[in-house]
Amino acid sequence: MFNKENYATLRKELDARQVTLVAVSKFKSVAHIRQAYDEGQRDFGENYVQELITKKDQLPEDIRWHFIGNLQRNKVKYIAPFIYLIQGVDSEKLLKEINKQAEKFNRKINCLLQVHIAREDTKFGFSLEELSAVQPEQYPYVQVCGLMGMASFTDDKNIVKAEMERLKTAFDHYREQYGFTILSMGMTNDYATAIEAGSNMVRIGSLIFGNR
Ligand SMILES: *Cc1c(COP(=O)(O)O)cnc(C)c1O
């Protein structure tokens, strides 16, 4: 389903704060994505390469597709020609492969470096220490636009807030040096906290499209 009312309310709230909404459409049908598109939504996030490609072919050309999942290096080539922003870049090996494929397709690919901020070790990403060793200028076909993170899955707002503030501090630290403009954090359950902490891009699925 596409919840038009939730979408309208959310969009108003985010537009007022100049926060970009990435509508997370994984497992959702092309028809439902189309409904959101018809309401003016243009940024959509997908987690799986095959699913993304299948959907992209059936939807308007002016959609900005965000890859938000865990991207395997051998699949970069399938999305390299068109992807708008790869959000979950979690290793230098992946950066290197994105750079290589971007060069092949003669374009610069926008990426966010994913930083591990949660307590769970199941979540992907650079540690803050690893992040400090990354040199974006080594990848001329990659535009590193900023950082992405996922907070711990907990109802304890203080934990979520503290983790997000750590990411915001890192973002501010590298902002000028690397020309970062995007800080992507916040999902259905924690987007309000994320915006308070300084996020300017949220990735929201369930609130718009219902539970998966
Ligand atoms: C699925 C997903 C989301 C959206 O989650 P909701 O809780 O449905 O808003 C956001 N970010 C990532 C990385 C995801 O995989």
Image: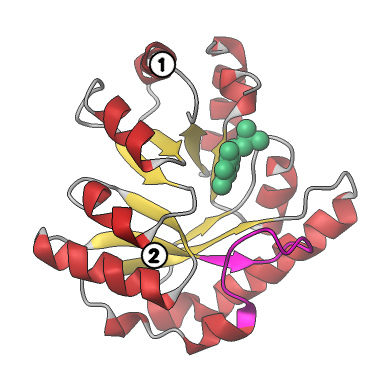
| Nearer the observer, 103 or 14 | 103
Extreme-bottom residue of the structure: 133
Quadrant for the N terminus in the image: top right
Badge 2 is on which residue?
145
Amino acid on which disc 2 is placed? Cys
Magenta segment: 114-128
Q: Work out whether residue 142 can be spotted.
A: no
Mark 2 vs ligand 1: CB under 8 Å? Answer: no
- Left or right: where does residue 164 sit relative to residue 5? right
Q: Is residue 154 above or below residue 212?
A: below
Magenta run includes residue 122: yes
Residue 110 image position (x, y, % from top left): 31, 59
Q: Secondary structure at mark 1?
A: loop
Q: Is residue 76 above or below residue 50?
A: below
Query: Ligand 1 is in which quadrant of the figure?
Result: top right
Badge 1 is on which residue?
39
Q: Is residue 135 above or below residue 61?
A: below
Predominant secondary structure, magenta span: loop
